Amino acid sequence: MKPIYLDYNATTPIDPRVADAMLPFIREHFGNPSSSHVFGLYPKRAVEKAREQVASLLGARPHEIVFTSGGSEANNHAILGAARAGRSRGGHIITSTVEHPAVTEVCAALEREGFQTTYVPVDPTGLVDPEAIARVITPETVLITIMHANNEVGTVNPIREIAELARRHGILVHTDAAQSVGKIPVRVDELHVDLLTVAGHKLYAPKGVGALYIREGVRLEKLIHGAGQERGWRAGTENVILTVGLGEACALIDGSLADHAAHMQRMRDRLESAVQRHFNDIRFHGNLEHRLPNTSSIGFRGTRAGDVLSELLDVAASAGAACHSDHVAVSHVLHAMQVPMQFAVGTLRFSVGRSTTEAEIDLAVQELLKVERLTPLQRSAG
């Protein structure tokens, strides 16, 4: 049987139309976009077209889009740049306890420079409460960075409410939207954020490319110094091939998002309904009203996720806990949500994609049922 891929939150395949758009810049148009001669003209135009495509999807203006090497670099630039640029005002940052390491590790690095970070807790569904943020704002707060959607459980945070709160205090807001772009609407003109991160490989573009939205007027310190590429925000010769891929991926989403989201939600709901029919002692994690349409985090009581995955050879999914010889390390997200340990250690994340089929979902459930006989998953009598 062909392996079934249900780990689209980890990465996505490159859309064939994205690959086709990149090919001319692999085979023919090799010039440096900064060159003034004809060899640089076509690559330069291609980069600017991609910038317009990303901006269109996000509801931004092209000059507010800076291309990066991926989501991690965009997060680093946003957080380090905003904090250091605002150092004269204060040294306090607010984030949450469920952020990606590309945010928490950056905050930790700033703490070594003398900054202070407040980690706001989440509720049992993984949701950040704007009121919890309001309670920890101080006159020294210079940045709030909260993810738009959680990569493990899919919970979508009220970023607009958080941004409006921050705006009243004159505080910059950054959101890591790596998981949400391409799955739900992500419009900076609606979210009211100052900084927003995009990761190409989460939306059917290549790995190694991303973008940072920087609202006009926002002041950041540079992360990469050198020549004046990217309007002076990021030095280095542009990666034309990958940038074109990211632009095309965004263009393919623009106008088709509702159809993609509806399809992914049908596939996710089909999976969850089948799991509910065949197993008891299960628990769905995340906010079931405010979550990504493609993400399902399921805790199976009485088993270890690593054991299940080791037997689930034909289905690609992720574990919510890392199993070691002498202990099980539960993810920081499930820990922050206070998920009971008996469910946390047996948590699997399934994330569907645009091309996931009903047949794949049904086969995945059948494969899970086979593993159930080998591990202490509990099937229902029905």
Image (cartoon, helix red, strand yellow):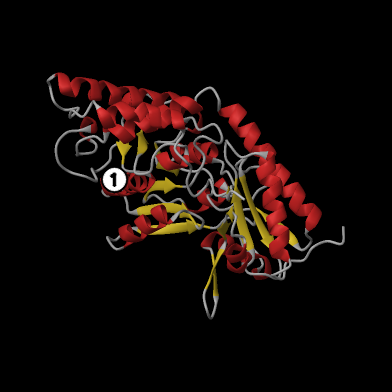
Residue 215, visible in the rendered structure = no
> Looking at the picture, how far across and down is residue 12, in whole percent?
48, 42
Q: Say if residue 149 shows up in the picture.
A: yes
Q: Amino acid at mark 1?
A: Gly
Give x and y (percent) for residue 230: 24, 32
Residue located at (23% from left, 26% from top): 29
- Total numbered labels placed on residues in the image: 1
Q: Is residue 32 left or right of residue 152?
A: left
Write down the quadrant of residue 294 in the picture: top right
Q: Which residue is mark 1?
A: 81
Residue at the location (79% across, 56% down)? 278
For label 1, the SS is helix
Question: Taking 22 as reference, is 13 above or below it?
Answer: below
Q: Residue at image x 27%, y 49%?
A: 84
Q: Position of residue 296 (x, y in %)?
A: 64, 49
Residue 17, x across and y down, in percent: 44, 28
Q: Is residue 365 left or right of residue 23?
A: right
Q: Is residue 62 left or right of residue 39?
A: right
- In the image, residue 193 above or below residue 333: above
Kindly identify the residue that appears in the image at 34 percent across and 48 percent down. Answer: 79
354 or 314: which is nearer to us?
Answer: 314
Q: Dot 1: few (<14), some (14–19), or many (≥20) neighbours within 10 Å?
A: some
Q: Quadrant of the C terminus?
A: bottom right
Residue furthest out toward the right: 382
Q: Quadrant of residue 220?
A: top left
Q: Quadrant of residue 100?
A: bottom left
Residue nearest the observer in this picture, 226 or 281: 281
Q: Nearer the viewer, residue 235 or 36?
A: 36
